[in-house]
Image (cartoon, rainbow, N blue to C red):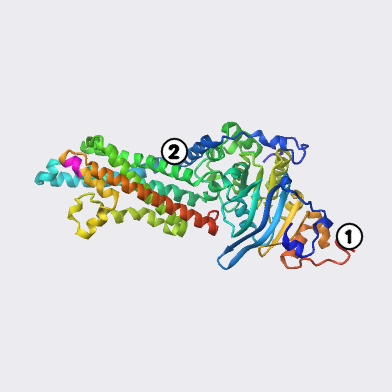
Amino acid sequence: MGSAAAEMGNEAASVGVHHPTASDSAIVVEDLAKSYGAVEAVKGISFTVRRGTTTALLGGNGAGKTTTLSMLLGVLTPTAGRITVLGEPMPAHRHRVLPRMNFTSPYVDLPKRLTVRENLAVFADLYGLRRPRERIAAVAADCDLDDLLTRPYGSLSAGQRTRVSLAKAVLNEPDVLLLDEPTASLDPDIGDRMRTYLERYQRRSGCTMLLASHHMGEVERMCDDVIMLREGRVVDQGSPRALIARYGRETMEEVFLDIARGRVGERVPGSAAEETTA
Amino acid sequence: MSPAGIVGPASAGRGDASAVAAVERHAGAAASLLRVRAMLRRHGYLILKSWTRIVSMMYYPTVTMVVWAFLTLYLAPTNNFLRDAPGFFIGAVLLWDVLFRGQLGVSLTFIEELYARNLGNLFVSPLTLPEYIAGQLAMSVLRALIGVGGACLFAFLLFRYSIFSLGLPLIAFFANLLVFGWAIGLAMSGVILRLGLGAEEFAWAAIFILAPVSGVYYPVAVLPTWLQAVAWAIPSSHVFEGMRGALLQGVFRWDHFWTAAALNAGYLALGAAAFAWAMRYARDHGTLLQMGE
């Protein structure tokens, strides 16, 4: 559990947050910090993500979400702290873990002149897949890309590109999938289909997902746990239902605004949390 | 995405680990080779299906070769040196381009990733830095073969000059120039990774500072003494001295070959170290996911 959350008196047990052990945690983060010179982007955060669950990493712009995801992926070196993914220390053993991880992010793209099939073939090789053709056919069917396989990636619409990125992200059937704003720029229909796919994919594979999102409906729908970041610290965490109850709100959107605007720890009179702790 | 296409039964239990190992993966050396192949495929697709790219790779070396060939035709009747070695300038310009293409092949392979904003995808995959570099070097060979190979073909078709008349020493010259190009290309990739795409021009221009001291068209002996010391510290000057030995005296200068090879080993290590340092800097400063156009 995050130390900041503990300091703020948010006893996890009272809101039903699971206390994970090392064996049932896919991701363990302890006192993780990242500074760029004098700027502290992440300030000693700690949290765990249980295997087979979906956890949201929430916070406003600059809260430290992407920095945290980058450190989990091994592309950003922490200033301090420890990360363990699937039992391996990161980034020290990243090459043992990365074959079992994948991610999508709006900060990266795929080569535009390569066709969708060529892009997936490259990543099938990068992840060392046996029988890549069969796997590409399977993810293309899953993500409804059959008609797009021979088209250059650069000729696709934003929604189509997002589906290709998702296909790339599940190509190696990862045990840990990090999703940085996976449905940003998607229309509600495509966004909903993508969420449905991810939910079913997780149920089938047992994959652990860590999701950074600004879409609170998505978080309420998909996530078992939520970690709230503000200015590089974990300021609260719990299940969406528990957070909504604790803040006496109707939606995660309202909880997000409370936390983003610094109303952390304030209890709304008459809320479920008040009643529970009274 | 159609709901009908979604994999697996929706009723499967959350955290059902029995389904996880459905995708089989290679491991060890086989996986490593596949990752190098991935880099070759990624850039091979780009080059081999684009005739415009292939033409542009051959264009500069061919045009330069044609200029020097006509200069040779103009001077040869009145110049004993060119009468004795009519292919001298053409051979020199073709070999110089091996160095240029070798360096560009490495640098451009890297720059392509920045333009595509694909660097983040690559380095969150299991791809290691040595595997990535191996892919860069292999692409450099392909680019050099296409670019210089095209110019060599035109040299034969237009001027009946065959670079292969140099015989077996050609392999030694080619290899040494290519490796020196790799070293510079890796160092330039590191510079771009450190400074951003604004430093792209360095990748194109870096090699030209070496041209005056490489003795491509004239012996190192014509340089001022202090500059000769610089010249002998770079492998390309030894290669071109070796080329002159092969063309004019018909001898293979082993001394120059081994000196060039030894210098190349050092420069290649330095180039790779510069790139590795820049990669560490990028991991420290969070630029791997953000670099791009």
Q: Pinpoint the chain carrying mark 1.
A: A
Residue B247 visible in this rendered orientation of the protein: yes
| Magenta-drawn segment | B244-248
Tag nearer the camera, 1 or 2 = 1
**Of A59 and A214, the residue lying toward us:** A59
Q: Secondary structure at mark 1?
A: helix
**Of A230 and A251, the residue lying toward us:** A230
Q: Main secondary structure of the magenta part?
A: helix
Q: Position of residue A273 (x, y in %)?
A: 86, 61
- Give the quarter of the figure containing the N terminus of chain B: top right
Q: Is residue A92 left or right of residue B133?
A: right
**Of A196 and A68, the residue lying toward us:** A68
Q: Pinpoint the chain carrying mark 2.
A: B
Rendered residue at 57%/55% (across/down) = A76
Residue type, label 2 = Lys
Question: What is the number of callouts on the image?
Answer: 2
